[in-house]
Image: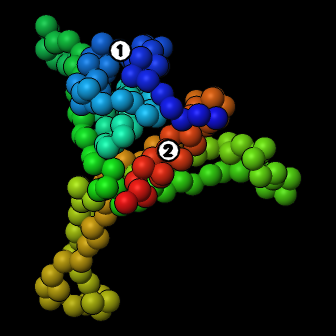
Amino acid sequence: MSTTASAGEMVSAIERSGYYPGLVADAVCSAVGTEQVVSYFVHHDAHFDPGMEVRRHMTVLALTPTRLVYSHTDEYPADESQPDSRPLAETSTEAIRCSRISSVALTKVIPDPASYEPGVTMPSEIVLTISWNSLRHVELEPAHCGDESCDADHGYTGAITSDDVTLRVSEAADGAEAITQVLDFARALTAASSAP
């Protein structure tokens, strides 16, 4: 299957999602600029916040010959405590040179692995993680020596993790076509990021 795409096909996919298509398409197309779109993936997702409100968000990945364009849009409901409050949307885009991509990780969930056939059996779920090491997430906590009666200050311990992009796509939630599309996009991105 060809991973060659066009900006028009990408915009059509954004429009089909129905999630603020003008806003999302404008953000992505502005970042792509005049470059050709080689491959893309549009992922519209919804989740429930603790108040049981549905919150939607959209991620668009667009690959050009030289860059990965990553766009993410979140929506925020109207503030019910304010009489004239309206919903808000926040869109961010980042354009990363392909040479800066340090990792393209793909996790596949295979149903009934005993009957797996290469090139035939499709995963039921994909997790795509792309790293370019631009953002780091730091989690700190007080360090302990293990002695429960010790009250000395042992400083802090923590972990620094990359905070780039991770997408989970499942056949049950997103459909079989989304699985195929994310696999095609991952192949194209891997090829582009491994070029000298």
Q: Residue 181 falls in which quadrant of the image?
A: top right
52 lies left or right of 35? right
**Residue 47 visible at all:** no
Residue 101 at x, y percent in the picture: 34, 55
Residue 114 at x, y percent in the picture: 84, 57
185 lies left or right of 93? right
Q: Secondary structure at mark 2?
A: helix
Q: Residue 18 falls in which quadrant of the image?
A: top left
Q: Residue at x 26, y 73 (%)?
A: 158
Determine crowd level at label 1: few under 14, some 14-19, many 20+ residues with C-alpha closer than 10 A: some
Q: Secondary structure at mark 1?
A: helix
Q: Amino acid at mark 2?
A: Ala
Split into 4 quadrants, where in the image is the C terminus?
bottom left
Location of mark 1 (residue): 21
Name the disc covering residue 188, or none: 2
66 lies left or right of 185? left
Q: Residue at x 20, y 12 (%)?
A: 86
Which tag is nearer the camera, tag 1 or tag 2?
A: 2
Q: Amino acid at mark 1?
A: Pro
Camera-side residue of 81 and 172 = 172
49 lies left or right of 117? left
Q: Residue at x 56, y 40 (%)?
A: 184
**Residue 139 visible at all:** yes
Q: Is the residue under label 2 in contact with that under label 1 (CB below 8 Å)?
A: no
Split into 4 quadrants, where in the image is the N terminus?
top right
Q: CA distance from mark 1 to mark 2?
A: 25 Å
Name the disc covering residue 139, or none: none
Q: How is the image coloured?
A: rainbow
Which mark sits nearer the N-terminus, 1 or 2?
1
